[in-house]
Amino acid sequence: MGLPDGTDSPVLLPRLSSVPGHLLWRAAARVGVQLDRVLPEGVDIHAYAALLALAGGATRTQQSVADMISVSRTTMVKVAAELADQGLVERVRKPGDRRSYALTRTPEGAAAARRWRRHAEDLEDALTRGFTLEEREALRRLLLRILDGELAPDTPEPLLESLGFLITRAHARMHRSFSEILEPFGIMPAHFGLLTTLVELGPIPQAAIGRQLGVSGASIVQLVDGLEAVGLVERRRLESDRRTQVVHLLPKAREIRDRAEELAMSDVRKRLGSLDAEETEELVGLLQRFVTGG
């Protein structure tokens, strides 16, 4: 479970409010929420990014486009098929590898990219309402520093200017690394956030955890199920209201969470290695405002 879903809650748990990885998780979720709110029907942000990746007459493999715009292979297959059906790209199988496709943007695809750019700019405006141009540029610059060496050298300029794209890429990088750290503990990054919430606030109802993390009720149920399965939490019904389930930490949960936090902080320092303390503080402040819409 990669992102909070179904909610645009502005609440930030104090213990997590200065953690860059958590802030990027919440920021990427807000990008997803705004995508659904801002983009009109028929405009797909992944399709737009793919058309940008094919600018200037470039022919690229389907997988290289997926890597450049940071989408899964499954998503790219769907996007490429839809673009081909609409006549916006030509898609041909590569000689010698019948499983691989080469994509080329058509003139109709170039025209669609020009039309859709306005909607992409509307999305950026919605994401950064309340930011000055200088603050937007400062956040973009810091995200590019984090992503140094991660982006393809020929990544299209409109993507490099997009805070939504950069936040999504930075989150994916942090999430991938944190997931590897947590694997020996049998938990995922979202589980870590839930455990931290319980450490900070004590036993609380599932719905309250969702509000703290900006996660839907259905997702919280899945997260608690996963932590119960590995013996880190348990649900208990309130005596005064049997319909309300309160989530409690079990004895070994705090030790695992603290050890995971120690490893995570060390990893974050590596991921932000090019930023000094002042720049890291600036990044945290800007992400906090991005998440809360401030």
Image (cartoon, helix red, strand yellow):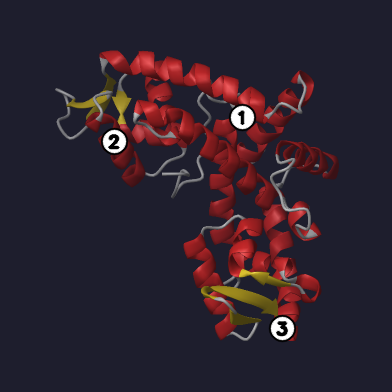
Which residue lies most toward the front here? Answer: 96
Give residue 211's mark.
Answer: none
Helix, strand, or loop for circle 2? Answer: helix
Type of the residue with mark 3: Thr
- Quadrant where the N terminus is found in the figure: top left
Between 131 and 182, the one nearer to me in the picture: 182
Report which residue position mark 1 lands on.
20
Q: Residues within 10 Å of mark 1 (few under 14, many from 20)?
A: many
Would you say the residues marked 3 and 1 are in contact, meaning their CB atoms lie under 8 Å apart? no
Number of numbered discs visible in the structure rendering: 3
Q: Is disc 2 surrounded by few (<14), some (14 to 19) or many (20+) residues within 10 Å?
A: some
Q: In the image, what residue type sits under mark 2? A: Gly
Q: Position of residue 257 (x, y in %)?
A: 41, 19
Secondary structure of the residue carrying tag 3 is loop
Residue at image point 77% right, 71% down? 55
The span from disc 2 to disc 3 (Cα, nearest Å) is 46 Å
Q: Say which quarter of the image contains residue 124.
A: bottom right
Could you tell me residue 72's position as x and y percent? Answer: 52, 58
Examine the image and state in which quarter residue 146 appears: top right
| Relative height, residue 93 to residue 162 (above, below) | below
Amino acid marked by disc 1: Pro
Whole-Å distance between the Cαs marked 3 and 1? 40 Å
- State the residue position of label 2: 226
Quarter of the figure that contains the C terminus: top right
Residue under label 3, please give it. 106
- Residue 279: image location, x then y, percent: 77, 26
x and y percentages locating residue 290 in the rendered image = 65, 39
